[in-house]
Image (spheres, rainbow, N blue to C red):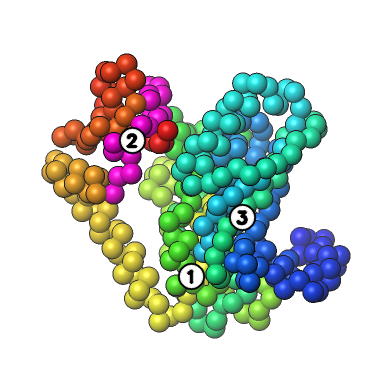
């Protein structure tokens, strides 16, 4: 018995007088009158993550997965509740500090607020996360129309290759290993698109179980079929490089899940609009790359300063050599972020993850 059969046979009838439940056939509960969207997910060790070797990364993965359910509906997540089960070996003081630190980083990255939770003792680690957001409407499942186009918001397949590397079933060079490792534990959510998705999508959900599987779920109550051109599915340059070097076909990695991009359908009339949005993003990126390639750093610095939310603020920079805390005071001529550390010294940040403190 699969998930949908279980729900239909035992629980769907209990939602008879509760239209906000969407008959348990969507990513969220949505109370239109109160503009309230709620989602809940459970994650078990050995099922949703291989082990608890990296507690700081596991917690990021499960939280991002949880808020993805709201983002794909066009709702900005605001509050979250987290319940955890495990034992003293899993939740040592060291691990709890790492978890707390990661949650703090995620809260600042996605503007979230921890609002409650629970703990219980068990042999294996698991988390249940409830996320809450507010909006006047959502993009529901099963609203696709005949001849709709099918879209995804980003690259597919990196996470699955990352999982295979973590499970030591695939061996790659350190640079690729680091990239796919991070793609598995810290998927890049299309966070800023939550407000736009309502304007262009007829129906949507996030890709957690795999592109084909989730496409079937997206229209499971409609008498529709779908067709996917595998050559049009976007994949990263890193995955392309791996496939070429190892002479593998990309379909091996495209339908496994954990991508957390938004899968949606849109009317043919929106093709031009969506293409223009995509072209604008790609053009801006390519222009920045050309400026970088030609060492025209002034243009890059100007764009950076225009959109930066860190300049003038106290930040924490996590880099490969180490972690640095200080005030972001500017960008030098080589496009390095310049920090004034707490001891007064200046530090140039070439690359890394930046968080406001």
Image quarter in which the C terminus is found: top left
In the image, the segment drawn in magenta is: 307-325
Query: Quick one: 250 or 150, which is closer to the camera?
Result: 150
Label ID, residue 313 = 2
Residue 170 % position (x, y): 55, 36
- Disc 3 crowd, CA 10 A, few/some/many (<14, 14-19, 20+): many
Which quarter of the rendering shows the N terminus?
Answer: bottom right
Of the numbered discs 3 and 1, the one sitting upstream in the chain is: 3
- Circle 2 residues within 10 Å: few <14, some 14–19, many ≥20: some
Residue projecting furthest to the right = 10
The mark closer to the camera, 2 or 1, is: 2
Q: Which mark is residue 132?
A: 3
Q: Is residue 245 magenta?
A: no
Determine which residue is flagged by label 1: 198
Tell me, yes or no, whether the two marked residues, 2 and 1, touch with CB atoms within 8 Å: no
> Which quadrant would residue 336 be assigned to in this image?
top left
**For the point 82% across and 62% down, which residue is it?**
6
């Amino acid at each position: 018995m699969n998930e949908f059969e279980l729900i239909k046979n035992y629980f769907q009838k209990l939602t008879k007088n509760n239209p906000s439940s969407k008959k348990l056939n969507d990513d969220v509960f949505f109370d239109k009158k109160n503009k309230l969207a709620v989602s809940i997910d459970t994650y078990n060790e050995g099922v949703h993550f291989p082990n608890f070797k990296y507690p700081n990364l596991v917690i990021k993965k499960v939280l991002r997965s949880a808020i993805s359910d709201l983002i794909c509906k066009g709702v900005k997540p605001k509050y979250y509740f987290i319940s955890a089960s495990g034992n003293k070996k899993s939740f040592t003081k060291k691990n709890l500090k790492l978890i707390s630190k990661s949650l703090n980083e995620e809260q600042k990255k996605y503007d979230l607020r921890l609002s409650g939770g629970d703990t219980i003792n068990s042999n294996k680690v698991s988390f249940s996360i409830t996320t809450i957001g507010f909006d006047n409407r959502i993009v529901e499942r099963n609203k696709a129309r005949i001849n709709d186009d099918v879209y995804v918001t980003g690259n597919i397949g990196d996470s699955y290759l990352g999982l295979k590397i973590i499970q030591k079933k695939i061996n790659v060079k350190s640079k690729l290993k680091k990239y796919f490792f991070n793609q598995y534990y810290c998927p890049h959510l299309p966070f800023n698109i939550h407000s736009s998705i309502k304007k262009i999508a007829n129906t949507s959900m996030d890709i957690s179980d795999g592109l084909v599987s989730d496409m079937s779920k997206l229209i499971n109550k409609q008498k529709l079929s779908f067709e996917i051109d595998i050559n049009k599915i976007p994949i990263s340059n890193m995955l392309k490089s791996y496939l070429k070097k190892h002479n593998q076909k990309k379909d091996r990695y495209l339908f496994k899940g954990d991508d957390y991009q938004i899968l949606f359908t849109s009317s043919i009339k929106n093709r031009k609009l969506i293409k223009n949005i995509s072209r604008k993003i790609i053009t801006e990126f390519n222009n920045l790359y050309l400026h970088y390639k030609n060492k025209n750093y002034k243009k890059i610095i100007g764009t950076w300063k225009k959109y930066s939310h860190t300049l003038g603020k106290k930040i924490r920079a996590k880099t490969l050599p180490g972690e640095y805390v200080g005030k972001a005071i500017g960008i030098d001529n080589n496009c390095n972020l310049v920090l004034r550390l707490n001891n007064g010294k200046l530090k140039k940040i070439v690359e890394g993850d930046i968080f406001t403190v």
